[in-house]
Image (spheres, rainbow, N blue to C red):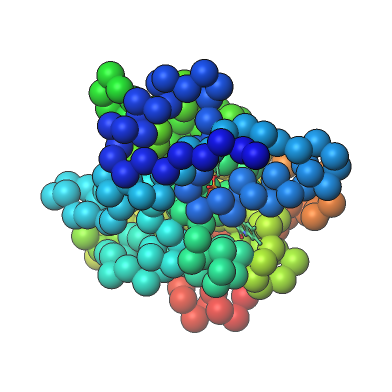
Amino acid sequence: MTAYRRPTRLTEALALLAEAPEPPLLLAGGTDIYPARAAAEAWMRPVDRPLLDLSALPELAGIEDRGDHHRIGALVTWAALRDAALPPWFDALRQAARQVGGAQVQNRGTLVGNLCNASPAADGVPPLLALDAEIELACLGGVRRLALGDFLRGNRQTALAPGEIATAVLVPKAAPGSVARFEKLGARTYLVISIVMVVAVIEVEAGRIARARIAVGACSAVAQRLPGLEAALAGLPLAAAASIPAAAHLAALTPIDDIRATAAYRRQAALVLLRRALAPPAEARAA
Ligand SMILES: Cc1cc2nc3c(=O)[nH]c(=O)nc-3n(C[C@H](O)[C@H](O)[C@H](O)COP(=O)(O)OP(=O)(O)OC[C@H]3O[C@@H](n4cnc5c(N)ncnc54)[C@H](O)[C@@H]3O)c2cc1C
């Protein structure tokens, strides 16, 4: 039987992690871990790695306004995010939360579990990259913060060091007047892995774009910001934004052919979703 521990304080969890002869797998909602274990068992490769269940750690709970940023604890589920009263620049993240899996997955799965699992198609990554979020990592020696873009190192690879637990995501407050939109393309509405998703966070001043932050997911090993497109949008009237995205802005993306779509389809879909995300609300619905 797999060894299982469920500490009730972060210090206890970190001590268990530091002392463990075999590094345990950190367990949050289990919506990535248990399906992966079931799949491995189906192929006669049972996984016997010990589990360190984080779900009783109060230090990882809740969403807090910390003045210049919001702190989203590592146990905050998609359902809690979906239902939270948050400022408009969180709308893309909340829209992603509404579309992750279905209600059961949203009730169990956590945003931080999604980031630590580091899938190229993780729906939580583009909204947070576009918000310049940081991840908070704790070990017995202290706490460090890393920009999300530095934490995510590749397909299923992160900068989480041995002995560390991700305790929260820190989201700097955006300027007043900032709006955010999330567009996801999948083969159906729910219970679907993204073919492409895009996020636009736009700061608007007097009808013009003061700053645009754009991210695209599922088109490279790690979701990416599009700095060329962000620069092209700055200063333009908001009404002109949807006409700006062009194939050249997607040059740095490296989509793959897989069971869900071809690379060429992903590029084209990313362009369509970007234009939709930048369109005025009524046009976006019609597109
Ligand atoms: C039916 C179904 C549908 C799904 N649909 C989607 C979807 O639409 N979009 C999407 O992006 N994902 C989807 N997922 C994947 C999954 O639900 C999400 O990635 C979820 O957010 C993972 O969170 P969790 O708390 O369940 O993570 P867990 O399964 O508990 O953990 C995932 C990974 O993160 C690590 N981890 C978790 N918490 C921490 C921490 N605090 N510190 C360090 N490491 C940690 C674990 O060790 C593990 O490697 C789906 C899954 C299922 C089963």
Asked if residue 287 shows in the view, the reply is yes
- Residue that lies at the very extreme toward the left in this rendered image: 67
Q: Nearer the viewer, residue 105 or 57?
A: 57
Q: Nearer the viewer, residue 158 or 209?
A: 158
Q: Is residue 168 above or below residue 77?
A: above
In the rendering, at what x and y percent does residue 160 appear?
A: 46, 27
Asked if residue 183 shows in the view, the reply is no
Q: Is residue 60 above or below residue 104?
A: above
Which of the 4 quarters of the picture holds residue 104?
Answer: bottom right
Residue 233 lies left or right of residue 137; in this view the side is right
Q: Nearer the viewer, residue 233 or 212?
A: 212
In which quadrant of the rendered image does the N terminus lie?
Answer: top right
Q: Residue at x 33, y 60 (%)?
A: 89
Which of the 4 quarters of the picture holds residue 65?
Answer: bottom left
Q: Residue at x 35, y 29 (%)?
A: 14
In which quadrant of the rendered image does the C terminus lie?
Answer: bottom right
In the rendering, at what x and y percent does residue 85 appear?
A: 28, 70
Q: Residue at x 59, y 54 (%)?
A: 31
In the rendering, at what x and y percent does residue 43 appear?
A: 86, 42
Q: Residue at x 56, y 79 (%)?
A: 285
